Image (cartoon, rainbow, N blue to C red):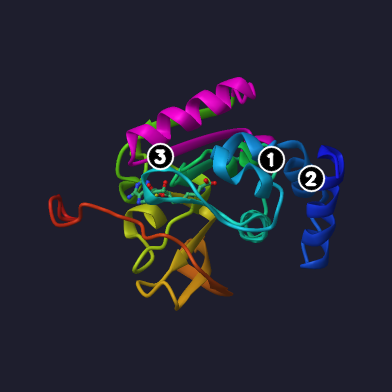
Amino acid sequence: MNAEEFRARLVLELRGEGIYDDRLLEAIERVPRDMFVPRPFQHQAWDNVALPIDCGQTISQPAVVARMTQALELDERMKVLEIGTGSGYQTSILSYLCRRVYTIERHRELLQQAESRLEALRRRNVTARLGDGSKGWPEQAPFERILVTAAAIDIPPRLSAQLSVGGVMVVPIGDDPENQRIVRVRRQEDGLDIDDLGPVKFVPLVSDRAAEPLSG
Ligand code: SAH
């Protein structure tokens, strides 16, 4: 199989799994996942599997990237916050589907690698920074969409507070890796609407809550 055939096979597989958003499928076909996958796993770069990256983290399975991105209901005018840059793969997909992406990663090494890939791909509408994403990015809030790509124990209150009214956050919830759910949170005038979008498996969202209380 050549590169185009690998890409086409992945898109076909995602369609079969219920991904119908054509802009999203185009972005998946366009973003070279092989650039985000470490050398020893190159032969699996276009397989529908999660793979290890540095710092004990993972690049998510394309089916999970697709499900979560589709659930965000993006349009090209939106400002999006992403927590957990990781390899930068999901960031890159988002950058094709909205106006601007703000992304936060807690591992410096991953952030630097992701930034140089995004630069090489000329993703000019991405701003990345190092830090604890569970605190969000207050200087840039509110966001119309928030995507969390690490599992939180509960809906992170500072993130839902940084959603605009009508805004949507997609976040994996659950402390037991065998029992996590993708949750979609929609902010209303008077509270949050919550949908369960099914099971998933993510590395944990690591936050330094103990060091900085919510009220601080
Ligand atoms: N979306 C990524 C997958 C990331 S794996 C990709 O496409 O490659 C989850 C990432 O979240 C890891 O890189 C991890 O370091 C990061 N992470 C975990 N807790 C975090 C936090 N509190 N703030 C920012 N990043 C966090």
Residue 91 visible in image: no
Q: Which residue is mark 1?
A: 97
Q: Which residue is mark 3?
A: 104
Tell me the CA gap for discs 3 and 2.
Answer: 24 Å
Q: Quadrant of residue 99?
A: top right
Classify residue 205 as left or right of residue 124: left
Question: What residue lies at 64% left-to-right and 53% top-to-bottom?
Answer: 69
Please state which amino acid type lies under the numbered disc 2: Arg
Tell me the CA gap for discs 1 and 2.
Answer: 7 Å
Please state which amino acid type lies under the numbered disc 3: Ile
Q: Dot 1, how many residues are within 10 Å of its Cα: few (below 14), some (14-19), or many (20+)?
A: many
Place of residue 80 in the rendered image (x, y in percent of width and height, measured from the top left): 54, 42
Question: What residue lies at 80% left-to-right and 43% top-to-bottom?
Answer: 26
Q: Which residue is mark 2?
A: 23
Asked whether the residues under the numbered discs 1 and 2 touch, taking CB atoms below 8 Å apart as contact, a structural biologist would say yes
Query: For numbered disc 2, what is the local secondary structure?
Result: helix
**Is the shortest distance between ligand 1 and the CB of mark 3 under 8 Å?**
yes
Q: Which residues are magenta?
A: 95-124
* Quadrant of the drawing holding the N terminus: top right
Q: Quick check: 34 above or below 71? A: above
